[in-house]
Image (cartoon, helix red, strand yellow):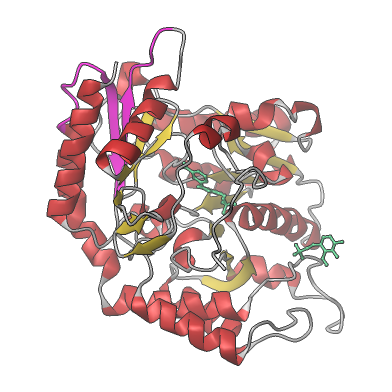
Amino acid sequence: MSAAASNIDAFWMPFTANRDFRTKPRIISGASGHYYTTADGTRLYDTFSGLWTCGIGHCHPKVVAAVQRQVAELDYCIGFQVSNDKAFALAERVIDIAPEGFSNCFFTNSGSESVDTALKIALAYHRARGEGNRTRLIGREKGYHGVNFGGMSVGGMVPNRKVFSPNLIPGVDHLRHTLDLQHNAFSRGQPEWGMHLAGDLERLAGLHDGSNIAAVIVEPVAGSAGIIPPPVGYLEKMREICDRHGILLIFDEVITAFGRVGKAFGAERFGVKPDIITTAKGLTNGVIPMGAVIVRDHVYDAFMQGPPHMIEFFHGYTYSGHPVAAAAGLAVLDVYKEEGTFEQAASLEQTFEDILHSFADHDKVIDVRNFGLMGAIELASRDGAPGARGLEIHKKCFWDEHLVVRNGMDVLQFSPFLNSDVDEMQRSFEVIRRVIDTVD
Ligand code: PXG
Ligand code: PLP
């Protein structure tokens, strides 16, 4: 029996225009390396590494073999009060590559769960230390921290928040975002302008009194909002303000961890050490859903008090530390090391930046932004139809040019493979230029 659906109406697709999709579906049934395949055998080059997930390419043989082995050996294991060997091994390996001082790893199944877990850790940390008054959480405009209630509340994506506005968690403020095309359009890497915007945190600490603020969460480089690298000095200043007021700094590294910015973590690349790091995506190369929240020793230590038979943190998911996901993670970390993936990613950065910025002179392009192997080409919107041009390019690339290109409204976003072939990358952008030329 074929696994293909005879009727595609049943699947309610995430973040998709479902009715428009069903008029002419885009369905993938296979993948290998840097290409997807459809049921009729068409190969499509993937310019987005899955969804920022598959940095080493699809169906890497070492990862496939590890997952196949594991699923036949230990398919699932209770994770509360008992756990499995692979989860411990993976936690140790993640800590090994984390910046110095990070001691412990809490497993989740996604970025959204990692974020909500991190926010709960921050609140519980202060309470455990006798500072239960620290309840305020600070996010940032244009931030994306997943779709669960905590992450949505600290997030700053207006369409994601709009319908749920009265139900967002209380006690949250937002810093201004740092994207201002008047001041920092066409920056290569980190813009020179905008460091002063970290001062918003100081203002909020003045307004509420810093002693009431639990944590601030930011993406070191904002991803979903269309690649917004931090202005020079911005993250350093944020760390300094957090230190002054006893506020925990959370870096949401769901995208930036595991090589995307040429190092194991954005924290390492920027030389700024947060207290908590959230991850997902690249932890398992997207093969099995898994996330990890990584904490510094002072955070973990604050929980390890009271009677030793007591549960220290009333939180966890049925699938936290899932053995098959953990086996995938172990294989992926092996590949990162054996193939020098993070160094490879770093060596591709300049070429990628040059290719992207070659679009700067295009009359439909209003900004180009990049950092590491994260890039965006922002197009002018059509009058009265924001997003239409971006979606048309996405569709034209898929059907006519066999390229999977991600658009967020009129921003084309790029997440090249960490082990991209330069010729393939160059060719894909030649095609994209042609498509931008031909659409209205
Ligand atoms: N935090 C960050 C920084 C993310 O980028 C999440 C949390 C949520 O992860 P999950 O696994 O729950 O989706 C993300 C996810 C895009 C795009 O187009 C990016 C994400 C999700 C959807 C679209 O850039 N990142
Ligand atoms: N809903 C019900 C009824 C449950 O029993 C559970 C877990 O046992 C959950 C939700 C949470 O599921 P998960 O642990 O997979 O997040």
Is residue 359 inside the magenta stretch? yes
Residue shown at 63%/75% (left/top)? Answer: 321
Q: Say left or right for 148 vs 398.
A: right
**Residue 187, image x, y percentages:** 25, 31
Quarter occupied by residue 333: bottom left
Q: Say left or right for 357 vs 87.
A: left
- Quarter of the rendering occupied by the C terminus: top left
View extreme (left): residue:
423
Give the magenta part as a residue range: 358-383
**Residue 336, image x, y percentages:** 33, 73
Label total for image: 0
Residue shown at 77%/38% (left/top)? Answer: 169
Residue shown at 60%/43% (left/top)? Answer: 14
View extreme (bottom): residue:
73
View extreme (top): residue:
383
Asked whether 217 or 65 is in front, the reply is 65
Asked whether 398 or 211 is in front, the reply is 398
- Quarter of the rendering occupied by the N terminus: bottom right
Residue shown at 18%/29% (left/top)? Answer: 434
Asked whether 70 or 265 is in front, the reply is 70
**Residue 186, image x, y percentages:** 25, 27
In the image, residue 336 sits, relative to residue 420, either above or below, namely below
Residue 99 shows in the view: yes
Quarter occupied by residue 17: top right
In the image, residue 124 sits, relative to residue 92, either above or below, namely above
**Residue 31, image x, y percentages:** 37, 62
Is residue 365 inside the magenta stretch? yes
Residue 202 shows in the view: no
